[in-house]
Image: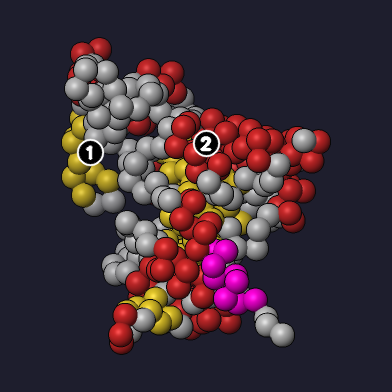
Amino acid sequence: MMLAAALAVAPRAAWAEAPLLPVFADFGRAAPDHGAYDQAIDRGADFLVAPVVPTKDGSLIVAPDPELSALTDVARRPEFGDRRKDTTIDGAPVSGWFCEDFTLGELKSLVTGAPARNGGRVAPPGLLSLQDVIDIARAGCVRQARVVGVSPRLVHPAYFAAQELNLEVRLADLVRIGGYDSTAAAMIAQAWEPASLRTLAGLSRIRRIQLVETEGGPADPAAPRYAAMTLPDGLKAVSGWAHAIAPTEPLLIQPATRGAIQPTGLAAAAHAAGLRVYARATAPAARSRLTALFLAGADGVMCSDAGLATRARGEAMEKLRPTG
């Protein structure tokens, strides 16, 4: 218990004890609640992925999108009716209620989850702040006597920067206050936008992950397309602003003959460029594919089912264990 307490209050020193192939609890487009994160820790998650957007008063809230009506009951709250607006996010028109128009207290008063048949809610009220997730991770360190880290995902950073609500500045402040400002800390930021990761690199020493999609590119037209990032020269360029890439599953493994799964070679190429590789599993996750991702060279996996990913990691490590 003394070791676990030390890990909870000394995140910079803790990373050396973390697994070599971490499992990231990644809930995708959902807004995870306290219980979902706790369950992920108990099932083996080493990092909690937290998509973050800013509040009006400068806090960071955990939500996969700035528009709130799909996640909360804000559209049914008459006191917030006048907050509805039209805006443009990364070139796309969007209407609704947006996080930057609400204080942290107001956002925590909103109810998340779908309406239940009895008139209640499926999920408990309130969105989590990033500080809440850090506290959950630290409590998980104590409960499980091992390292549990946090991986903030910066959502639409250019949109917020235009409103002087810079995600990178707010994250760097929280990182410094929490004692995570080190490449050895159990804190890894991730983003689709290279410019955001470059900005963060000038503000904080935490590690950074470049998210890579199967097609398209970042919202910034000046940024390289995702396909270019997966080429040898592109991977070398990415290593200038990130410590790792997080590609989608099809970029790392592909179906082969007779039901087999074969690696694409991207993991090896990324390693040659000095990058780690954290695979983003396709939902719904399958143990065979998760195992194949580790065998293909992934240094970790992001998955909504932490227990399944942990078992797949164990299976892969057994297969990779030298014999004789």
Query: Looking at the image, is 20 positioned above or below residue 10?
Result: below
Q: Is residue 54 rendered to the left or right of residue 208?
A: left
Residue occupying the far right of the picture: 2
Kind of residue indicated by mark 1 = Thr
Image: 321 above or below 197: below
Q: Work out which quarter of the rendered image holds the N terminus and state it.
A: top right
Q: Is residue 188 left or right of residue 155?
A: right
Q: For residue 251, what is the image quadrant?
A: bottom left
- Residue depicted at x 63% and y 33%: 139
Residue 263 part of the magenta-drawn span: no
Q: Position of residue 211 (x, y in %)?
A: 43, 61
Q: Front-most of 98 and 220?
A: 98
Circle 1 residue: 87
Q: Which mark is residue 38?
A: 2
Name the residue type under label 2.
Asp
Looking at the image, residue 207 sits to the left or right of residue 309; the answer is right
Label 1–label 2 contact, CB within 8 A: no
Residue 24 against residue 79 in the figure, above or below? below
Q: Is residue 12 visible?
A: yes
Element carrying mark 2: helix
Residue at x-position 34% and y-position 41%: 30
Badge 2 density bin: few <14, some 14–19, many ≥20, Cα 10 Å? some
- Residue range in magenta is 313-321
Q: Name the chief secondary structure element in magenta.
A: helix
Furthest residue to the top?
79
Residue at x 41% of width, y 58% of height: 192
Q: Position of residue 222 (x, y in %)?
A: 36, 66
Position of the C terminus, as image quadrant, is bottom right
Image depth: mark 1 or mark 2 in front = 2
Please state which of residues 142 and 47 is positioned toward the viewer in this rendering.
142
> On screen, 17 above or below 173?
below
Position in image of residue 315 (x %, y %): 54, 67
